[in-house]
Amino acid sequence: MDILFNLLKSDANAANAFGALASAAAAFLALFVSGFSVWISVWSARTQRKHNELSVRPLAEVTVADYENSLRVKLRNNGTGPMIITAVTVSDGAKTKDCLIDWMPNLPGGRLWNNFTHALHHRTLQSGAEIVLLELTEHDGERNFSKCRDLVRKTLAPLTVNVEYTDIYESVMRPSRKPLSWFGRHV
């Protein structure tokens, strides 16, 4: 070490060369650190975007209720973000229609439906919310509800509901399919 200090004191060119090398090394190190910082920033931004997309991801679920006094099919968003419904289709394996009510027969005695939904194109469903696709519930003192219920069960059993949807970033989610065969267990 003493030899190096003596050389730098006695030879000005060597001192200048050593200083230039030290400056170049510091500049290279600064360039490396700033390049690494840019890489970390890009990685962080991508990771944050992925987290944001996952934190508002919808999850479609078609639920069924089959009771003695009530039949119901609902679409529910069990995800953490809004669901943008692009299409709901109902199929029997051969034909496809836009909604459940289009498959339903006329009910005996002119009975009306409690609730139903027509075609759901470009409808938004917030997290935790649900849409009743079809509902038939017995009224107080109603007679012959069992005929309506059994007819609807028989009609629903061979059908499958397919829900296509996106999230708010317009990422297409995997479709949710629900066979309604549960209604056929009493038929």
Image (cartoon, rainbow, N blue to C red):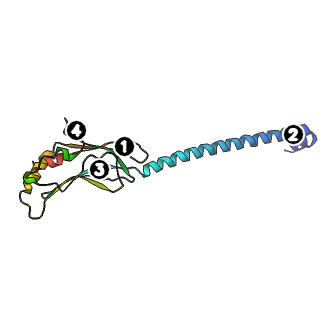
- Mark 4 or 2, closer to the camera: 4
Q: Residue furthest top?
A: 94
Circle 3 crowding by C-alpha within 10 Å: few under 14, some 14–19, many from 20: some
Inspect the image, locate mark 4, and give the three-letter code of the amino acid beneath it: Thr
- Labels 4 and 3: the sequence-earlier one: 3
- Mark 3 or 2, closer to the camera: 3
Q: Horizontal and vertical percent for residue 42? A: 57, 44
Seen in the image, is 38 located left or right of residue 85? right
Q: Quadrant of residue 19?
A: top right
Residues under labels 4 and 3: Cα distance?
A: 19 Å
Work out which quarter of the rendered image holds the N terminus and state it. top right
- Mark 4 or 3, closer to the camera: 4
Q: Secondary structure at mark 2?
A: helix
User: Residue at position x 51%, y 49% from top?
Assistant: 48
Residue that numbered label 2 is attached to: 16
Residue that numbered label 4 is attached to: 96
Residues under labels 2 and 1: Cα distance?
A: 64 Å
Q: Horizontal and vertical percent for residue 26? A: 75, 43
Inspect the image, locate mark 1, and give the three-letter code of the amino acid beneath it: Met
- Mark 1 or 4, closer to the camera: 4
Circle 2 crowding by C-alpha within 10 Å: few under 14, some 14–19, many from 20: few
Q: Secondary structure at mark 3?
A: strand
Residue that numbered label 1 is attached to: 173
Q: Nearer the viewer, residue 2 or 40?
A: 40
Residues under labels 3 and 1: Cα distance?
A: 12 Å
Residue that numbered label 3 is attached to: 61
User: Residue at position x 19%, y 44% from top?
Assistant: 102
Residues under labels 1 and 4: Cα distance?
A: 21 Å
Q: Nearer the viewer, residue 109 or 144?
A: 109
